Amino acid sequence: MNFQDQFPLLNTTTYLNTASSGILSGSLLDWRKTHDQDFFNNGSIFRNTQASFLQSVRISLSAFFGVKTENTFLVPNFSFGFNTFLEGLSGKHRFLLTQEDYPSVNYPVQSRGFECAYLPIDENIEENILAKIKTFKPTVLALSLIQYISGIRISLDFIKELKRDFPDLIIVGDATQFCGTSAFNFEESGLDVLIASGYKWMLGGYGNGFVFIKDQVRSLLYTEAQKAERPTEPFLLGKDVLSLFFEPGHQDTLAFGTLQQSLFFFEKTGIDFIQKHLEDLGRKATSALLERGLIHKSIGLRKQHSTIFSLNVPENKLLEQNIICSYRGGGTRVSFHFYNTQDDLQRLLEVLDKLPRV
């Protein structure tokens, strides 16, 4: 498939920066214009259907990711969702975290005074998790499913086995770098909580995210509030306790509508196609970059890697050649999404091959 018509930016740059920000399609731009024109024309009348519209977004998310609609919450971003989750937990929990994970994962846990232990991120991360669970005995494991610097991808089969062997362990995944890259069914996974922002691989623009929670976790959150009386105002009737915390106040129909439209695009394109394309492109990129010694050899020891790579090259040398990338964690990060091609990989390799080796 050729996506340059939908994403004109691809005609003028080699865009290898989805791990920083997804790009906006032409059809999404048109939808957003129509949305705001409707608001411009109708004022408050435009918002009369917002409750049913937002419910339709929850339904779209639940269908796409295999999660119960009543356990699907719309949040402005991962950080808001994760902080809200933490606020609802007992302070007695013990957290197992990964070193150098995204600050939005680790800092909120640390700053609340939870007891924490940390794991190194390397080719043996699953074995490291299992060993640390046996010694530290955490009650919560919280980590990014795909690490934002190295691109190391946690095995979801391992997560499922972990949940089977430690059923009382609450497993929380930051899926911001994962959702939109692979087929995924939340209810069948080992995760208890999944939280993600929509602006990266979901191509949903800014200001939207989502939280999925398993039934057994609901009763552990905001336990005192669940016993207390709830608001009786007509516009809040029917909202459960978790909705009142995860979805307080008004919600942005432009942001969540953009996410929903992107979901429709993913459904039309086919998530299986996207997954296969990324697996094929990822394997080729991994092999080529390992051959050149530009990524850590441990990446080659993993059964499956993502399409995020940290290169030991100066960022400005790629930017000068109109290859869009980011400096992260001491290296230059490149990332490939479904709209990237083998030509994009070849262009990257041609530029890299001309650079002096450090």
Image (cartoon, helix red, strand yellow):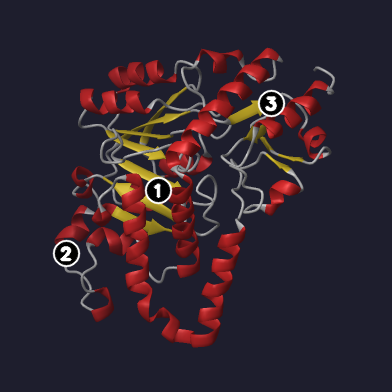
Task: Examine the image and state in which quarter residue 14 appears.
Answer: top right
**Residue 120 visible at all:** yes
Q: Position of residue 43 (x, y in %)?
A: 49, 86
Which quarter of the figure is the N terminus placed in?
top right
Q: Position of residue 78 (x, y in %)?
A: 45, 49
- Relative to 9, say whether 159 is above or below: above
Which three-letter amino acid code belongs to the residue tagged 3?
Answer: Leu
Q: Secondary structure at mark 3?
A: strand
Q: Position of residue 149 (x, y in %)?
A: 58, 32
Residue at (28, 39) in percent of width and height: 192
Which label's residue is closer to the chain start, 2 or 3? 2
> Badge 2: how crowded within 10 Å, few (<14), some, or many (20+)?
few
Which label's residue is closer to the chain start, 1 or 3? 1
- Relative to 179, say whether 96 is above or below: above
- Residue 82 is marked as 1
- Residue 228 is marked as 2
Q: Secondary structure at mark 2?
A: loop
Residue at (50, 61) in percent of width and height: 258
Image side of residue 65 versus residue 13, left or right: left
Task: Examine the image and state in which quarter residue 224 appears.
Answer: bottom left
Which three-letter amino acid code belongs to the residue tagged 1?
Answer: Phe
Which three-letter amino acid code belongs to the residue tagged 2?
Answer: Ala
Residue at (54, 51) in percent of width and height: 203
- Residue 41 is marked as none
The residue indicated by pointer 3 is: 311
Q: Position of residue 254 (x, y in %)?
A: 50, 68
> Badge 1: how crowded within 10 Å, few (<14), some, or many (20+)?
many
Between the residue at mark 2 and the residue at mark 3, the CA separation in whole angstroms equals 53 Å
**Residue 87 visible at all:** no
Residue that protrudes farthest toward the front in the picture: 1
